[in-house]
Image (cartoon, helix red, strand yellow):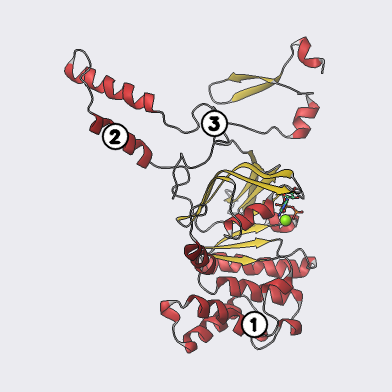
């Protein structure tokens, strides 16, 4: 996992972003020496300072306990001399075993992010890691291994996920053959795993059918089986139900839920489908290449034993402390250039600036 310091400088100058400065270490070392000796600070040896610096650096890094960690991720595309900043310092943490959705307007950067997490594209700056793989530092060999064994990917276009001349079962066996996984060296074991996965996802009846003989929803469920073949830590899906009607989309989403619940696979789905977004534990909204807000759902049981799902919406605070105010809020209070912040005991008040000059623009 890459720590801070490898992330380019998108936030250089923002206070406290790195969480560490050499000055802090020097003064705390001096302070400790002074109180111990009760007189002028004892000179701290270079070795001691280096040890303290290393301690800071090796302390819990941002996202250390997360399966997926994106830290100020930047992706700039240049097409015909025009720069497009698809990701503008995006922060995202995803825990092991999560089932979460990414939503956002067209062009907000969702596919760009997913392609980076899939190892298909490389960010311009920032840090990203999945399952301990540093996505900026992988060589070609580890990138191939990462794509075969750590992530599974499902595209929106059903035709892109399966090879047309192979049956579902053969499609599922193929990634196992390519990765040559130790436990599944024998043909019979691979065939058994393919049948098991197709069964879990409810498409056993398509075992010997080629994609052209299957419906769109069946193809997507078989595609999830292919993505799960090598038991990846995470499955990523970009609008997997975009080409399907709502009833079929529900079945496909049910297959993701099954993979998450029965196999413990972490699932990240990009979707425009509100019913999918409502059915996951956490929905993160991306706006202009950054994570802007998230909705977290929890099941609560009341005093009568009744279960209900409670959803709460949070605004994201990024690593530099930046917070995006929802546009409808800023418009309602005519907030334009700046606000007054007041720290209260347990909250922060954000007030419109009532200075006359700020109302002139
Ligand atoms: N290869 C590329 N070259 C140039 N610009 C690109 C490239 N890929 C994406 N972009 C631009 O980056 C921005 C983000 O695109 P992205 O595909 O990530 O959006 P998205 O959120 O997936 O949108 P949609 O919901 O329409 O799929 C857009 O402005 C897009 O035009
Ligand atoms: Mg997209």
Please give left or right for residue 55 compared with residue 197 in the image: left
The residue shown at (22%, 28%) is 45
Answer with mark 3 or mark 2, whichever residue precedes in sequence. 3
Real-space CA distance between mark 1 and mark 3, rounded to the nearest whole angstrom: 50 Å
| Helix, strand or loop under label 1 | helix
| Helix, strand or loop under label 3 | loop
Answer with mark 1 or mark 3, whichever residue precedes in sequence. 3
The residue shown at (72%, 81%) is 211
Q: Which residue is farthest front?
A: 81
Residue on which disc 2 sits:
50
Residue 360 quadrant: top right
Residue on which disc 3 sits:
12
Q: In which quadrant will I find the C terminus?
A: top right
Residue 116 quadrant: bottom right
Image quarter for ligand 2 equals bottom right
Residue on which disc 1 sits:
168
Q: Is residue 307 above or below residue 27?
A: below
Residue 267, horizontal then vertical, whole percent: 58, 60
Badge 1 crowding class, 10 Å Cα cut-off, few under 14, some 14 to 19, many 20 or more, is many
Residue 135, horizontal then vertical, whole percent: 52, 54
Residue 67, horizontal then vertical, whole percent: 49, 54
Label 1 or label 2, whichever lies nearer to me, is 2
Q: Which residue is farthest top?
A: 356
Answer with mark 1 or mark 2, whichever residue precedes in sequence. 2
The residue shown at (62%, 75%) is 201
Label 1 or label 3, whichever lies nearer to me, is 3
């Amino acid at each position: 996992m890459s720590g801070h310091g490898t992330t380019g400088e998108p936030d250089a100058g923002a206070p406290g972003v790195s969480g560490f400065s050499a000055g802090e270490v020097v003064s705390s070392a001096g302070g400790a020496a002074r109180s111990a000796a009760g007189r002028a600070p004892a000179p701290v040896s270079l070795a001691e300072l280096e040890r303290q610096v290393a301690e800071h650096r090796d302390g819990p890094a941002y996202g250390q306990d997360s399966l997926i960690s994106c830290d100020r991720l930047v992706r700039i595309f240049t097409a015909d001399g025009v720069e497009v900043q698809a990701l503008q310092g995006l922060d995202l943490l995803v825990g092991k075993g999560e089932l979460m959705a990414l939503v956002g307007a067209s062009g907000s950067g969702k596919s760009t992010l997913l392609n980076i997490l899939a190892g298909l594209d490389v960010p311009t700056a920032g840090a990203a890691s999945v399952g301990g793989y540093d996505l900026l530092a992988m060589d070609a060999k580890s990138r191939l291994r990462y794509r075969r064994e750590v992530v599974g990917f499902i595209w929106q276009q059903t035709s892109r996920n399966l090879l047309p001349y192979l049956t579902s079962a053969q499609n599922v066996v193929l990634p196992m053959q390519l990765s040559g996984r130790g436990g599944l060296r024998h043909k019979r074991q691979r065939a058994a795993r393919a049948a098991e996965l197709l069964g879990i996802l409810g498409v056993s009846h398509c075992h010997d059918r080629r994609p052209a003989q299957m419906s769109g929803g069946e193809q997507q469920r078989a595609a999830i089986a292919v993505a799960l073949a090598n038991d990846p830590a995470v499955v990523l899906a970009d609008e997997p139900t975009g080409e399907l009607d709502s009833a079929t989309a529900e079945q496909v989403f049910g297959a993701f839920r099954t993979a998450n619940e029965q196999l413990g696979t972490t699932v990240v789905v990009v979707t425009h489908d509100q019913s999918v977004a409502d059915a996951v534990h956490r929905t993160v909204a991306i706006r202009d290449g950054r994570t802007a807000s998230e909705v977290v759902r929890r099941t609560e049981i009341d005093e009568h034993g009744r279960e209900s799902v409670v959803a709460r919406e949070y605004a994201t605070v990024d690593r530099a402390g930046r917070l995006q105010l929802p546009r409808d809020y800023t418009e309602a209070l005519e907030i334009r250039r700046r606000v007054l912040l007041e720290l209260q005991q347990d909250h922060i008040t954000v007030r419109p600036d009532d200075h006359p000059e700020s109302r002139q623009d």
